[in-house]
Image (spheres, grey):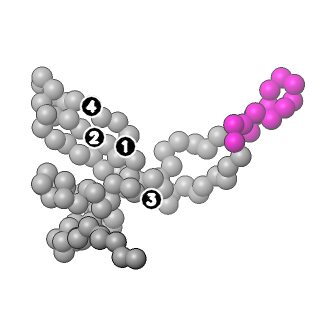
Amino acid sequence: MSEAMMPISPDALHHRTRLFDLTKPVTISAEKFNEVWPYVDAVYTKLQSERLQAYGTLRVQKYECRLRKSKKSSTTREDTEGKAIKRRHSSIRTQDLCHVRIKVTRPV
């Protein structure tokens, strides 16, 4: 059984590599970003969306790598009766697996 896959242009592969192997800030055009984003969006999670500048002319979206830990992991607490309180048992991931954040600025 063979399934049709979405073709990836060599240029999109080049820009995808740039977004995964960041050593300095990268600026790309909106058209190129829209072409590359479907190939990398599963790795990043959206942080916030806000409008900037006078009269809300720009929209800024911020994303960070899913392996980045922005928040401290929760620990088990005890209630007044000495019972452990934590919704689920999960392992604590190590920090600093990924430092990448993406800031997308677009006109509204």
The amino acid marked with disc number 2 is Gln
Q: Earlier in the sequence, mark 1 or mark 2?
A: 1
Q: Dominant secondary structure of the magenta stretch?
A: loop
Q: From which residue to which does the magenta span run?
A: 75-88
Secondary element under disc 2, as helix, strand or loop, is strand
Q: Mark number for residue 46? A: 1
Mark 1 to mark 2 CA distance (whole Å) = 7 Å
Q: Are marks 1 and 2 in contact (CB under 8 Å)?
A: yes
Nearest-to-viewer mark from 3 and 1? 1
Mark 4 to mark 1 CA distance (whole Å) = 12 Å
- Which residue carries the number 2 mark? 61
Nearest-to-viewer mark from 3 and 2? 2
Mark 4 to mark 2 CA distance (whole Å) = 7 Å
Q: Are marks 4 and 1 in contact (CB under 8 Å)?
A: no
**Residue 89 is one of the magenta-drawn residues:** no
- Which residue carries the number 4 mark? 50
Estimate the x, y position of residue 101 in percent, counting from the top left. 35, 51
The amino acid marked with disc number 1 is Lys
Q: Residue at x 48, y 45 (%)?
A: 70
Q: Residue furthest front?
A: 1
- Which residue carries the number 3 mark? 98
Against 42, residue 71 (above or below) is above
Q: Residue furthest right?
A: 81
Q: Residue at x 40, y 47 (%)?
A: 45
